[in-house]
Image (spheres, grey):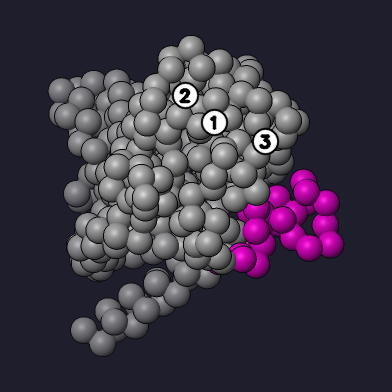
């Protein structure tokens, strides 16, 4: 979709940040091209909001580190599995799926990782993936990291796993996989919509929004319309397919408090990663800017006034911004970005295993 068409359909909404017109919103959602933002960029949340969410996320991440350290004493292969889990989530988030109407949706894999390695290890792996996305690829804000971690690395894996575990205990494991993954991504989407939507209420100057300019009446239906339908289905699909693969090749590898990962399974799951790397260029099929990720220049064409916090806010230029590698075409850059991330996660997994082995030898 051209920028002119994008402006045509979005401008009426953004000029009414506190007002909800269902017909206008549905028309915009039908005609916009781009994915619906799950990675909150910088300057869309106030510094206070970022700080509160970072403080809320920090103790859970700290607890996850403590729990994983304890797990590593009994399960040495969890170390490479952490790298594999981070890689899996990273690739799923790159793997945009084109859907009718020209928009895209992608999975996150939060509940899938919980099913494979447990919610604490999943939370840690997702946190590392989000850190790399923000710092190296500019996907998600630096200041907004706490918010993105809270939504995707805490709420999604823990709530989704709780739903899955409930069904599993009732001997309905497959239903748990389907419902848990669906609930997980929609909880994360809803939290994102709330965090964005309250900004015009809590952060204003002279009656004008300082940061995200559109209120709850826009952010909630915009996020949930897609996540309750397409994005939720995409998440369920990837979660179920990979779950079935594990269930067939190594059912004992599915997480339980006493499960232990094996070297052979670690090797097998790497084939899944390889397949996803090859398929990542499919994420480039849909063009356009994601809902809620517009630049100040794009907002200037959509609104009469760009919020001061967005126009003059924090700026960070990632080394491989938007998953592009200088000197390569877009598709090659996308694949090289995926390979770069996998190598980093692989090295981190090896480092954790080496450090864990060294500690064990001195015990």
Which one is nearer the viewer's eye here, 196 or 122? 196
**Quarter of image, res 240:** top left
Residue 310 position within the rendered picture, expressed as x and y whole percent measured from the top left? 50, 54
Contact, CB < 8 Å: mark 2 with mark 1? yes
**Quarter of image, res 53:** bottom left
Which circle, 3 or 2, is nearer the viewer? Answer: 3
The answer to if 326 sits in the magenta stretch is yes
**Quarter of image, res 38:** top left
Q: Residues within 10 Å of mark 1 (few under 14, many from 20)?
A: many
Residue extending furthest top? 23
Residue for badge 1 = 105
Which circle, 2 or 1, is nearer the viewer? Answer: 2
Residue for badge 2 = 226
Question: Can residue 276 be seen from the camera position used here?
Answer: no
Which one is nearer the viewer's eye here, 154 or 196? 196
* Mark closest to the chain's N terminus, 3 or 2: 2
* Mark closest to the chain's N terminus, 2 or 1: 1
Q: Calculate the distance from the C-alpha at mark 2 to the C-alpha at mark 1.
A: 8 Å
Element marked by disc 1: strand
**Which quarter of the rendered picture does the N terminus lie within?**
top right
Question: Can residue 51 be seen from the camera position used here?
Answer: yes
Position of 315 compared to 206: left or right? Answer: right
**Which quarter of the rendered picture does the C terminus lie within?**
bottom left
């Amino acid at each position: 979709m051209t920028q002119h068409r994008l402006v045509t359909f979005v401008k009426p909404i953004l000029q009414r940040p506190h007002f909800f017109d269902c017909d206008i919103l549905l028309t915009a959602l039908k005609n916009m091209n781009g994915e619906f933002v799950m990675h909150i960029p910088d300057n869309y949340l106030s510094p206070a909001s970022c700080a509160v969410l970072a403080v809320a996320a920090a103790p859970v991440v700290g607890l996850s580190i403590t729990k994983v350290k304890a797990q590593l004493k009994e399960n040495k292969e969890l170390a490479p599995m952490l790298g594999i889990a981070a890689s899996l989530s990273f690739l799923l988030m790159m793997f945009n799926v084109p859907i009718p109407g020209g928009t895209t949706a992608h999975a996150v894999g939060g509940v899938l990782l919980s099913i494979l390695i447990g919610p604490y290890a999943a939370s840690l792996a997702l946190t590392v993936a989000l850190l790399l996305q923000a710092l190296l690829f500019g996907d998600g804000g630096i200041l907004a990291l706490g918010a993105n971690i809270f939504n995707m690395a805490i709420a999604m894996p823990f709530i989704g796993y709780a739903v899955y575990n409930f069904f599993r205990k009732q001997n309905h494991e497959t239903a748990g996989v389907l419902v848990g993954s669906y609930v997980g991504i929609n909880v994360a989407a809803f939290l994102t919509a709330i965090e964005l939507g309250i900004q015009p209420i809590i952060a204003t100057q002279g009656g004008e929004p300082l940061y995200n300019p559109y209120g709850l009446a826009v952010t909630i239906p915009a996020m949930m319309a897609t996540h309750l339908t397409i994005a939720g289905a995409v998440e369920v699909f990837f979660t179920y397919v990979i779950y079935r693969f594990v269930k067939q090749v190594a059912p004992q590898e599915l997480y339980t408090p006493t499960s232990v990962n094996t070297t052979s399974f670690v090797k097998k799951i790497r084939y899944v990663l390889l397949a996803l790397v090859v398929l990542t260029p499919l994420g480039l099929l849909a063009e356009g800017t994601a809902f809620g990720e517009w630049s100040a220049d794009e907002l200037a064409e959509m609104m009469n006034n760009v919020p001061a916090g967005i126009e003059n806010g924090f700026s960070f230029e990632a080394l491989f911004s938007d998953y592009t590698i200088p000197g390569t075409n877009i598709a090659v850059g996308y694949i090289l970005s995926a390979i770069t991330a996998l190598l980093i996660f692989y090295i981190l997994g090896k480092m954790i295993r080496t450090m864990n082995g060294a500690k064990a030898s001195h015990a």
